[in-house]
Image (cartoon, grey):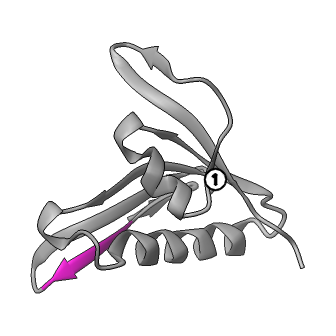
Amino acid sequence: MKSEGFFILGCFEGEKLVGAVAIRDFCHVSLLFVDKAYQHRGIAKELFAKALAICIHEDPELDGITVNSSPYAVPIYKRLGFEVIGESTTNDGITFVPMKKSILKP
């Protein structure tokens, strides 16, 4: 699905959706999910890499991509190259940690 800077990529096993990434404005991860039974297989890494490539294609001047990570997912995003850029915050009962992955230009 793609619409004005928003798109979703999915990973399937047969007809079963086992992972997904959603990007907003070609610069913010809205969702990154992998079914528990399929974790630790590189699915999140591959989904994110493909999403990031699309973001850079759509905006060659892109200098970074952000995410509001759940506290649980901070180590996962760190493995994907994100860094914490702010304090843990709770908004409308949802706790998140703002993070950013800088994109280095050649």
Q: x and y percent of residue 65 in the render?
A: 65, 53
Residue 83 falls left or right of residue 93: right
Residue located 33% across and 14% down the image: 93
- In depth, the one of 104 and 20 nearer the eye is 104
Q: Quadrant of residue 10?
A: bottom left
Residue 81 falls left or right of residue 51: right
Against 56, residue 97 (above or below) is: above
Q: x and y percent of residue 21 in the render?
A: 39, 61
Q: x and y percent of residue 76 in the render?
A: 43, 56
Against 79, residue 75 (above or below) is: above
**Does 12 appear in magenta?**
yes
Q: Which residues are magenta?
A: 9-13
**Does 59 appear in magenta?**
no
Look at the numbered disc 1 and give the secondary structure of its residue. loop
Q: Quadrant of residue 33?
A: bottom left
Against 47, residue 88 (above or below) is: above
Q: Within 10 angstroms of label 1, few (less than 14), some, or many (20 or more) residues? A: many
Residue 9 falls left or right of residue 97: left
Please identify the residue farthest to the bottom as the structure is shown. 14
> Which residue lies under the disc numbered 1?
27
Q: Quadrant of residue 54?
A: bottom right
Residue type at the position of mark 1: Cys
Question: In which quadrant will I find the N terminus?
Answer: bottom left
